[in-house]
Image: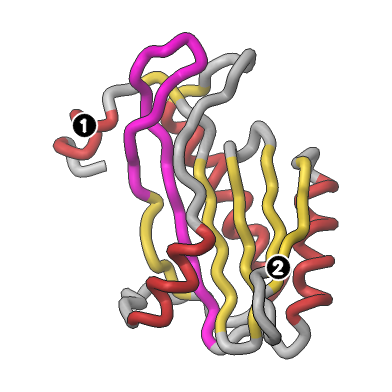
Amino acid sequence: MRVRPAGTATTVILIGAGVLTGCSAPGEATFATGDAKRAVVTVVDDTTAAIGGEWDIYSGPAVEGCTISDGRDGAAYSYITTLRPGGSDPEADVVAVERLWRDRGLTTERYESGGSDPILGVRGVGSAADSLDFLADVRMYSLSGLSACAEGDAVQMQNDGE
């Protein structure tokens, strides 16, 4: 994976549709921030490797605030990557991502945007990452992940360069 900023208006529109916000893991134990970061980076990187191609890091892994299940403030990591152009068979890639995530114990849900030429997608939820979202279109793929909420002070972590 090469690292370069991807900041066009098209990217913002497609990525913005796929970013899942919020963070809490009701009834689950909290994670250490290092474990949360590793978990989301691993699942995103393994997913991009399974699809193949030259993915760009759009954002992250970046720490952000969240709420732990007991109501305390915590820290989570968001990680967003893009592949431009997307693959030649978005439907097959959605199936492959869904299979990979299910094999890792994630709950998945397929969806598509409206219109005559819908963008296909799959969401994943599980302990490895609080939420994942893969959007597949021949013009561009995007993959966003949000880690489980961990104990930590997101503002202080950001101030410390995290």
Q: Nearer the viewer, residue 10 or 33?
A: 10
Side of 112 relative to 38 (left or right): right
Give me the residue at 40% from left, 19% from top. Answer: 151
Determine if the magenta segment contains residue 68.
yes
Q: Amino acid at mark 1?
A: Val
Q: Quadrant of residue 10?
A: bottom left
- Which residue is under mark 2? 112
Lower sequence index among marks 2 and 1: 2
Q: Nearer the viewer, mark 2 or mark 1?
A: 2
- Span shown in magenta: 62-84
Question: Is residue 121 on the magenta stretch?
Answer: no
The disc at residue 107 is none
Image coordinates of residue 73 in percent, x first then y, are: 34, 19
What main secondary structure does the magenta stretch of the protein show?
strand
Instruction: Give the residue type at disc 2.
Output: Glu
Whether residue 35 is visible to the viewer of this picture, yes or no, is no
Q: Which SS class for mark 2?
A: strand
Extreme residue in the top direction: 70
Would you name the residue on which mark 1 appears?
155
Name the spot of residue 5 as percent of width and height, x first.
32, 74
